[in-house]
Amino acid sequence: MTDQTVSTIAAPPRAASSSAMQIAVLASLAATGTLATNILLPSLPEMAASLKVSTAAVTSAITVFLAVFAIGQLVVGPISDRYGRRWPVLAGFVVFLAGSIWCGLADDLPGLLIGRVIQGAGACATSVLSRAIARDLFTGAALARAMALIMIAMAAAPGFSPLLGGALDRGFGWRSEFVFLAVFAAIAAVAYDLVFGETHHATRTPLDPLAIAKNYFGLVTDRRFLVPAATVSLIMGGLFSMFSAAPRILIEALHFTPIALGWFFAGTVMFVFGAGMLATRLAPRFGLDRAVQFGLLLALTGSVAMLLVSVFDPAFLPFLGALSVFVFGMGIVNPLGTAQALSPFGEKAGAASALIGFWQMMGAAIGVYLAATVSHEAMFALGIVLTVASLIAVGLYTRRAKPAT
């Protein structure tokens, strides 16, 4: 497969002259949701004390955000296919900014949860439409490369945000984290408006419940979408199960400090970055199918290794080695599988991107739940979740039809 150039669009004068700038702005859109998810983790005990609730109760601020974030994507995608990308993105940033301010001013848990609902409603627009806009602008290997860089941003946000949140909490208190999120949204909104005009120039799909249901049903029953999208969602479920299990493994079992845990999360970004860069080279040379298969093989190898480590040698270095192999494989599968799922559906890229985002967040929720409930031994539970998810993903991907890549 040969590398593709940016697709021709009727770009307005304010559109970016550089695809690198476009991708940088799209990365900020994609990172908004994951940044708002993990930045709070170091502050949960202080937030609980400030709001006079238990730490377990205040974690509902993360659960509520993820739920709205997932479901809202199913609504935003079709809206953008009907009315375009620009105004939904800008409205999403405004809503996210308003929710951040609300959270920063909250003086009880219900007030915080209301703010998080507002935040999630805004973040779902920016996240889902980052992928749709990439599909509007790029095709083929160029789309895979754009998705890889966007995925790196989405992985960097949860990787580095605990460190950032901890520093803000220590220096200014937990409310400063919401101030940071509000400022981030304002800057990203201005950057988006300066760099992009309207990018959706394909046929506009009608906005009515029957048409939306038909769009989603058509995607779900189309193997070109179903197989790669479901494969990516399974692997992403494994990634989020790792994020949720790592504190129990490293702090409780291996006696890491919270700061060391933050550095561990940040280190995972390096593996994702390397995998994303490799993915952009594998796809043009070997084709999307073979590149995704290679990533799945790595993910499965790391998953089985994690399970074996948990049984025979539950120490840090073996744990790190197994996890690194899985994360590297995930970093290849995620962008290439996403590009594969979106490529045939330019006329309804918003709906396709929304469905992928919804499945990924649902996969994340299921992975987090299973990692916490399968076993009291966190590393063993993580090994089981990763192995089962990877096995299903490999088996599912073998059912993919073999169109030209």
Image (tube, rainbow, N blue to C red):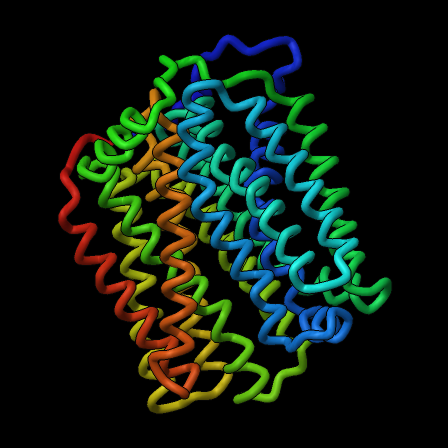
Which residue in the rendered view is the most extreme toward the right?
171
User: Observer-nearest residue: 8 or 199?
Assistant: 199
Which residue is found at the position 52% from the left and 89% from the top?
Answer: 253
Q: What is the x, y in percent for residue 63? A: 52, 61
Considering only vertical position in the picture, is 339 above or below 22? below
User: Observer-nearest residue: 353 or 75?
Assistant: 75
Asked whether the viewer can see residue 127, the reply is: yes
User: Observer-nearest residue: 267 or 191?
Assistant: 191
Q: What is the x, y in percent for residue 36? A: 63, 53
Q: What is the x, y in percent for residue 133? A: 48, 27
Give the quadrant of the N terminus. top left
Which residue is found at the position 37% from the left and 31% from the top?
Answer: 351
Considering only vertical position in the picture, is 363 above or below 28? below
Considering only vertical position in the picture, is 330 above or below 187? below
Considering only vertical position in the picture, is 316 above or below 351? below
Which residue is found at the position 27% from the left and 27% from the top?
Answer: 210
User: Observer-nearest residue: 50 or 276?
Assistant: 50
Give the quadrant of the C terminus. top left
Asked whether the viewer can see residue 146, the reply is: no
**Residue 91 shown left or right of residue 138 in the figure:** right
**Residue 291 shown left or right of residue 98 in the figure:** left
Which residue is found at the position 41% from the left and 23% from the top?
Answer: 81
When asked about the image quadrant of residue 53, the answer is bottom right
Q: What is the x, y in percent for residue 91? A: 62, 29
What is the total number of numbered labels drawn onto the structure image?
0
